[in-house]
Image (cartoon, rainbow, N blue to C red):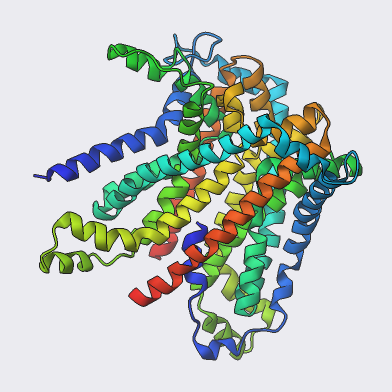
Amino acid sequence: MPSFPRILLGLFCLLVAVLLLAPTLVVIPMSFNGNKSLAFPPVGFSWQWYGNFFSNPDWTTSFTNSLIVALIVAVVATVVGTLAAFGVTRAAARTGGLLRALLITPMVVPGVVLAIGIYAVYLDTHLVGTVTGFVLAHTMLAIPFVLIAVQASLEVFDRRLETAASSLGAGRLTVFRTVTLPLILPGILSGALFAFITSFDEIIVALFITSPYLKTLPVQIYSSITRDADPTVAAVGTLLFLATSLIIIAGLLFGMRRGRT
Amino acid sequence: MTATSDLTTGAERPAFLSRFRPRGAVWLAAPAVLVLVVALAYPLAIVVVRSFTDPVPGIDNYIWFFQSAVNRTVLQRTFVVAAWVTLVSLICAYPYAYAMTIVGKNVRLVLILCVLVPFWLSGVVRTLAWVILLQDSGVINSFLRGLGLSPVKLIRTPPGVIIGMTQVLLPFMILPIYSVMKGIDTRLLQAARSLGAKPWRAFLQIYVPLSLPGVYAGAIIVFILSLGFYITPALLGGPRSILLSSLVQNQVLSLLNWGRGGAMGVVLLVATFVLLAIAAPLMRQKHTSTRREA
């Protein structure tokens, strides 16, 4: 029989969990709304908003744009961020610490301040509404996440394995490819996932550097919300939620299997 | 996230390993630094320069900013809202993180999932969900009416903005607190009790002080992120709950006044970095205290 404070604590945690999950619990049912309104609880049932997402060019184009930008960002930020993680971990302690503090500043700079600065630069260099512009800004925002993820892997990586491999005659590249890389791969992959999501979900800078010719999905969602009450937004939210859940659960299962063998 | 990895960064490596540290490893970070210079430092420098030169050189934009009553109100409100979000997050997060340390493995997994699942929903969509929940005919007000209570005005008010922002930022409070609490040796509490301390006294005098580094880390992250929030206040707030970020956006995009918008941005930027500088020693304390306990 749990004590009274324990019951109180349990109830409190339930409340906090409801607060955390509330938006998800609202968005999923709304995406099946029978009427063209963003009401909760929804009225009737239909798949039409999912159909609309796949057939309306506004939605499909912005989705494709986001996918292209986020994939390039995931590749570039992962390579650049992983190199930086090596630099930070293997430089002298003081230099490494300073470098790390510098490289994670994008996480704390207020989004709007950054956005107006980037917008000013892009207006001068004609990068507004270009894939290059989006990739550059999003890569900068994604580097901290890759750095943190890869650095965490490098901290627990035993450097003596590298020493052992090179003492047996392996060159530096071979050591990296056959010893270091496989062992820190989970960190690199989760860094790549973070980078992808950072870019795919980024809205503040995107709102400034977007153009009628190049809209990303969050910009399309934002303009749809401010324009009318179109439940397609809820359908998009649900689809993205499902996709993210599947990728992360797959990653966890993969990690668990790796851990066991 | 930052706070937990900070703990390991300081870990001493065996001395013989440092001999194998290749020279010039630091250059591996050059591409990342280059991206940061081009896409972060240069744009921010432009903002600073324009705040002093647009339309005429001088500090006119700053004088305008601090002389306008509207701006001062919004600046003050931005800090007050950030403080409320930090406080409400802390009140929600502390017991939650504590519960995570005392439950069994399966319940803990559920509690961790509840913290992570919000991240899987797109940020803009999440704010939309709060618009639906908080509106006058929304779920919360229907619930209150069902209980026979009078409905509350939430949408377009500061409390509505605070609720929405708390939900987004709560994980940033829970995770650092949990990562510190996880490492607290609960035998210290038993020792205190065996020496005659009442359970509450032992908790307040032993457990709470040991958990403070996590609280500081979480509080500073949440406060700083709150200061720069833009989308949530823009969609959930009304004219009387506008925050500094929206004013910056308005000056630049609607009024094309780069100088004034820049000056506001610089104020926000300076506030952020001053807070970080003040908080850095508090976070550093963590290393020494954990090492002493270890």
Q: Tell which of A219 and B150 is nearer to you.
A: B150
Residue B213 rendering spot, x and y as whole percentages: 41, 61
Q: Tell which of B192 and B75 is nearer to you.
A: B75
- Report which quarter residue A230 is drawn in: top right
| Residue drawn at 13 percent across, 58 percent down | B198
Compared across the picture, whether B128 is left or right of B287 comes to right
Residue A215 visible to an observer of this rendering: no
Outermost residue to the front:
B67
Figure check: A148 above or below A39: below
Q: Tell which of B71 and A49 is nearer to you.
A: B71
| Residue drawn at 48 percent across, 17 percent down | B135
| Residue drawn at 35 percent across, 37 percent down | A17
Compared across the picture, whether A42 is left or right of A171 comes to left
Residue B219 rendering spot, x and y as whole percentages: 46, 51
- Report which quarter residue A260 is drawn in: bottom left
Residue A151 visible to an observer of this rendering: yes
| Residue drawn at 26 percent across, 63 percent down | B206
Outermost residue to the left:
A1
Residue A104 rendering spot, x and y as whole percentages: 63, 58
Compared across the picture, whether B98 is left or right of A111 comes to left
Please identify the quadrant where the C terminus of chain B is shown: bottom left
Residue A235 rendering spot, x and y as whole percentages: 54, 23
How many marks on residues?
A: 0
- Report which quarter residue A55 is drawn in: top right
Figure check: A61 above or below B57: above
Compared across the picture, whether B208 is left or right of A256 comes to left
